[in-house]
Amino acid sequence: MRVIPAIDLIGGKCVRLTQGDYQKKKIYNENPLEVARRFEAAGVSYLHLVDLDGARCGKIVNVEALEKIATHTKLKIDFGGGVKSGEDLRIAFEAGAQQVTAGSVAVDNPELVMEWIQKYGGERIILGADVIGNRIATHAWQKASGWELFDFLEVYLAKGIRYTICTDVSKDGMLEGPAIELYREILSRSSVNLIASGGV
């Protein structure tokens, strides 16, 4: 098991939301690079970086923070939030992301995500499979899609996805522990490499 700290960004600052609610935002540091350097100094090698502005508006916003962290640390960054087009994906990779999460776009435009998997490989595209109940959540967790979690995973595993990040939205930001039973079920029913998120 690998521990991956997360930095969520709004307006270039490190924040925490409660259950994805943008009205329940707490700023805990105004300097993402400083936080990333602290993680690195503690022995961490990987970082999950989330552009919450991008997730809400549908295009990458906090690319400057990604570039700074990628330039000034050796952290391997997986980046998500607002990646909806090939141009967004190119920007994220060129800014220094090692992996990029395809979240809402994997629901809204599966053909495009299949192209990304073919072009960049199943190792570099992480499938975002956040859930409200057992339905895939989209658009910064503001909507529950028609996709059931395990059907969604099955389709993308068949297309070459190797990694998925799954957050039980009801657990996120609550500091009450992760959705252990959900993660056990995912691992028992699929061969995916699971990044378990939320409530940790």
Image: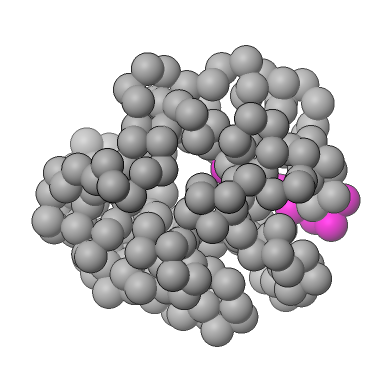
First to last magenta residue range = 158-165
Residue 40 visible to the viewer:
no
Residue 156 visible to the viewer:
yes
162 drawn magenta: yes
The colouring scheme, among rainbow, by chain, secondary structure or one colour, is one colour
Q: Please tell me which residue is depicted at 27% across the width and 74% down the height of the picture.
A: 64
Quadrant position of the C terminus in the picture: top left
Number of numbered tags placed on the structure image: 0
91 lies left or right of 45: right
Q: Position of residue 72 (x, y in %)?
A: 22, 65
Residue 198 placement: quadrant: top left
Q: Is residue 85 above or below residue 172?
A: below
78 lies left or right of 126: left
Q: Is residue 163 above or below residue 125?
A: above
Q: Please tell me which residue is depicted at 35% across the width and 73% down the height of the picture.
A: 61
Q: Position of residue 38 (x, y in %)?
A: 17, 44
33 drawn magenta: no
Q: Nearer the viewer, residue 57 or 78?
A: 57
Q: Please tell me which residue is depicted at 47% across the width and 22% down the height of the picture.
A: 178
81 lies left or right of 84: left
Q: Nearer the viewer, residue 112 or 139?
A: 139
126 lies left or right of 169: right
Q: Please tell me which residue is depicted at 35% across the width and 25% down the height of the picture.
A: 174
Q: Is residue 57 above or below residue 87?
A: above
Q: Position of residue 18 (x, y in %)?
A: 34, 36
Q: Nearer the viewer, residue 169 or 47?
A: 169
